[in-house]
Image (tube, rainbow, N blue to C red):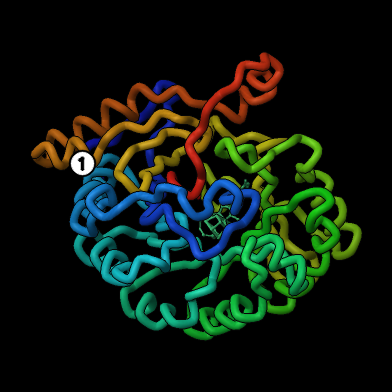
Amino acid sequence: MAADLVTDTLKRPVRDLRISVTDRCNFRCPYCMPKEVFGAGYQFLRDPQLMSTDEIVRIAGAFVELGVEKIRLTGGEPLLRADLPELVRRLKVELGVKDVAITTNGWLLERFAPALKEAGLDRLNVSVDSLDAVKAGQMNGQGLPPDRVLRAIDAAAAQGFPVKINMVVQRGVNDHEIETVAEYFRERSMVLRFIEFMDVGNTNQWAGEKVVPAAEIVERIGRRWPIEAVGPAYRGEVASRYRYADGAGEIGIIASITEPFCRDCHRARLSADGKLYTCLFTALGWDVLGCVRSGADDAELRAYLSRVWAGRRDRYSDERAAILASGVARSKAEMSYLGG
Ligand SMILES: C[S@@+](CC[C@H](N)C(=O)[O-])C[C@H]1O[C@@H](n2cnc3c(N)ncnc32)[C@H](O)[C@@H]1O
Ligand code: SF4
């Protein structure tokens, strides 16, 4: 039970915490970690800079006291962290977090799924941008075909995990696969979430023309299979949901570009080195890990987080058009570092 609920300047509570457990990844998706930037010589975080499992649990515990009910472990690629099942177990058992999920590229999932199940993980999101071997290889930047990830998805579902799929759609890259990927996951009754290509970070060559608007995706899917809108499952859900009229499950669209949802954003992000970001599109992180390592007790840690959240006024996606039109360059943290 939260002891000390906090809201920001726009009356938004903090309900949802995303923790980047590593800034490293075994993929190099050009829209997130382009090879040319994240290649040899790129300075990833090193051990003392990363949060330890104890530190993550401690900070997560303080967030739970402030109202957080859902925690998602992400990165970078969270399954590169060998102690991930232990972290999940502690979040569930020690903190009693209602909903613990991970977002993964799926490459190591088949190996980890039994340990994650045993640890009490509630849900999984797996990223699949293409079913075509060549295209998938381009989109993961490593030339890897999708088969192993698709097998892992089936294995995780067989373990009893609810699995959702994330597909980042880019015009001229994989938008021709919208219906193909939808059909594949419809057959498995898995929820597929289309994500508009976002202008996160500074290195992914984002341009407005590469965004396929949510309305176009909905129209295309609806032309192939009748769909109907479904209300959000909870306040602050970022995906707009649609169900197939024939009962074959659901799709979601995350339309951060064309239909921003800042007014209902209840999400805090903790980077792999323990900085708190109150928006995906900011360069400013608050040094929570520094606060922990300087000896703050639980009340001081809670007070620090509370102060930062209470002062939060971010609504970048609402303001994007005006910011881009102003021509003033704005630096942002990379998604792999602060947690997608
Ligand atoms: C940063 S990744 C981290 C977790 C894991 N490595 C994965 O890929 O699922 C989290 C999610 O962010 C999405 N993502 C990354 N860069 C993006 C961008 N520029 N626009 C939209 N979604 C993006 C990924 O496709 C993935 O679904
Ligand atoms: S989207 Fe995920 S898998 Fe792709 S480079 Fe980013 S962190 Fe890695």
Q: Residue furthest right?
A: 223
Horizontal and vertical percent position of residue 167: 67, 59
Whether residue 6 is visible to the viewer of this picture, yes or no, is: yes
Q: Quadrant of residue 63?
A: top left
163 lies left or right of 80:
right
| Element class at badge 1 | loop
Q: Quadrant of residue 52?
A: bottom left
Relative vertical location of residue 301 with respect to residue 136 in this rendering, above or below:
above
Q: Who's the residue at 45% across and 22% down the image? A: 313
Q: Residue furthest front?
A: 41
Q: Residues within 10 Å of mark 1 (few under 14, many from 20)?
A: few
74 lies left or right of 195:
left
Q: Who's the residue at 19% across and 50% down the image? A: 58
Horizontal and vertical percent position of residue 178: 80, 61
Relative vertical location of residue 324 with respect to residue 12 in this rendering, above or below:
above
Q: Who's the residue at 62% across and 56% down the image? A: 29
Q: Who's the residue at 60% across and 80% down the image? A: 148
| Mark 1 C-beta closer than 8 Å to ligand 1 | no
Whether residue 71 is visible to the viewer of this picture, yes or no, is: no
Q: Quadrant of residue 4?
A: top left
**Depth order, front residue of 337/62:** 337
The amino acid type found where label 1 is placed reads Ala
Horizontal and vertical percent position of residue 53: 23, 59
Horizontal and vertical percent position of residue 310: 33, 25
32 lies left or right of 60:
right
169 lies left or right of 72:
right
Task: Return the residue at label 1.
Answer: 3
* Mark count: 1
